[in-house]
Image: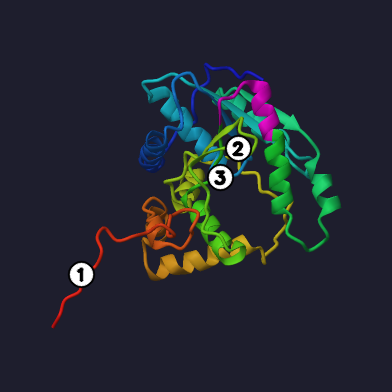
């Protein structure tokens, strides 16, 4: 559905404008560093109704107005038919903002509840089903990029989830090609902290829609990792940012993956010489 492009953004307070400037700078740097958006791109912004995706859309709209290149934005929400989901909230917001959008209705909720036993983590299957639908919609809409709302803290949390529970040194890349090879996924909030995003969402008064599919699920592994990182950050401010920057400064020769670095053929530049004493 095409919204009215003549609508203006909601008024922003002085504090939210300052925060917006910082977030806009970080998003712009991430886009530039990873060549996320190019002239003529049609960027499909996956909008869940949470603070991250609202912030992503808001900042991308600001950059769209200021950028020297022209690109399109299309907001897409997947209505997963969760009981009590307020279907009116996102259309009303997007129409007020003048953002082109599409609401996709597909009952993945029933599938997840049917397949996953009670008490088990629902996020993995929910995410896979949602991703499949969004990839299909991106093809239908002719989107050249899919923008997701994952931020710096999500990326660091994923690093430790894989490290502690998957036995892999792996995180979320700011930009990647889908497994099928026909979609480019970008994460423009990769340099942004969750704390800044949460503060911005409050200042901008986004109509947040909570995800009730997972319930409280206090024992989720990601929740435990988040709590660990928050405790680290309290003890040593800036630690999360340093961990993220380490992902940008990798030395394969100082790890232990023989597929990543050719340890087998490692040789000295010259043969050692013996010295008689």
Q: CA distance from mark 2 to mark 3?
A: 24 Å
Where residue 97 sits in the image (x, y, percent)? 55, 26
Q: Disc 2 vs disc 1: which is toward the camera?
A: 1
Indicate which disc, 2 or 3, sits on the residue closer to the N terminus. 3
Residue 153 pos. (x, y %): 49, 54
Q: Does residue 59 lie above or below 102 as drawn? A: below
Name the quadrant containing residue 218.
Answer: bottom right
What residue is shown at x 57% (from left), y 60% (from top)?
162
Question: Which is nearer the eye, 39 or 79?
Answer: 39
Image x and y of residue 57, in percent: 52, 34
Q: Is residue 161 visible?
A: yes
Question: Which residue lies under the disc numbered 1?
Answer: 273
Magenta residues span: 134-145
Q: What residue did someone put label 3 on?
A: 51
Closest to the camera, between mark 2 and mark 3, is 2
* Label 2–label 3 contact, CB within 8 A: no
Position of residue 260 in the picture relative to residue 32 (left or right): right
Q: Are marks 2 and 1 in contact (CB under 8 Å)?
A: no
Along the viewing direction, whichever of 139 and 82 lies nearer the viewer = 139
**Disc sitting over residue 94 in the figure:** none
Asked if residue 240 is positioned above or below residue 71 in the image, the reply reads below
Crowding near pointer 3: few (<14 within 10 Å), some, many (20+)? many
Q: Secondary structure at mark 3?
A: helix
């Amino acid at each position: 559905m095409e919204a009215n492009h003549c609508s203006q953004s909601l008024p922003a307070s002085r504090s939210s404008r300052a925060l917006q400037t910082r977030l806009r700078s970080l998003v712009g740097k991430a886009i530039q560093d990873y060549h996320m958006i190019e002239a003529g791109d049609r960027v499909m912004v996956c909008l869940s109704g949470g603070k991250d995706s609202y912030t992503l859309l808001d900042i991308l709209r600001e950059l769209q107005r200021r950028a020297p290149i022209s690109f399109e934005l299309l907001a897409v929400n997947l209505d997963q038919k969760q009981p009590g989901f307020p279907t009116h909230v996102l259309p009303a917001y997007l129409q007020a903002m003048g953002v082109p959008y599409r609401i996709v209705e597909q009952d993945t909720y029933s599938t997840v509840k049917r397949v996953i036993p009670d008490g088990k983590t629902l996020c993995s299957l929910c995410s896979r089903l949602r991703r499949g639908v969004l990839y299909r919609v991106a093809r239908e809409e002719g989107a050249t990029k899919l923008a997701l709302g994952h931020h710096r803290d999500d990326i660091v949390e994923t690093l430790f989830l894989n490290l502690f529970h998957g036995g892999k040194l792996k995180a979320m890349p700011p930009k990647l090609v889908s497994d099928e090879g026909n979609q480019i996924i970008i994460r423009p909030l990769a340099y942004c902290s969750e704390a800044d995003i949460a503060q911005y969402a409050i200042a901008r008064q986004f109509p947040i829609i909570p995800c009730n599919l997972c319930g409280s699920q206090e024992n989720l592994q990601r929740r435990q990792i988040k709590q660990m990182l928050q405790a680290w950050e309290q003890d040593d401010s800036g630690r999360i940012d340093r961990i993220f920057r380490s992902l940008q400064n990798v030395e394969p020769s100082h790890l232990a993956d023989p597929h990543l670095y050719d340890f087998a053929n490692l040789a000295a530049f010259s043969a050692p010489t013996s010295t008689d004493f």
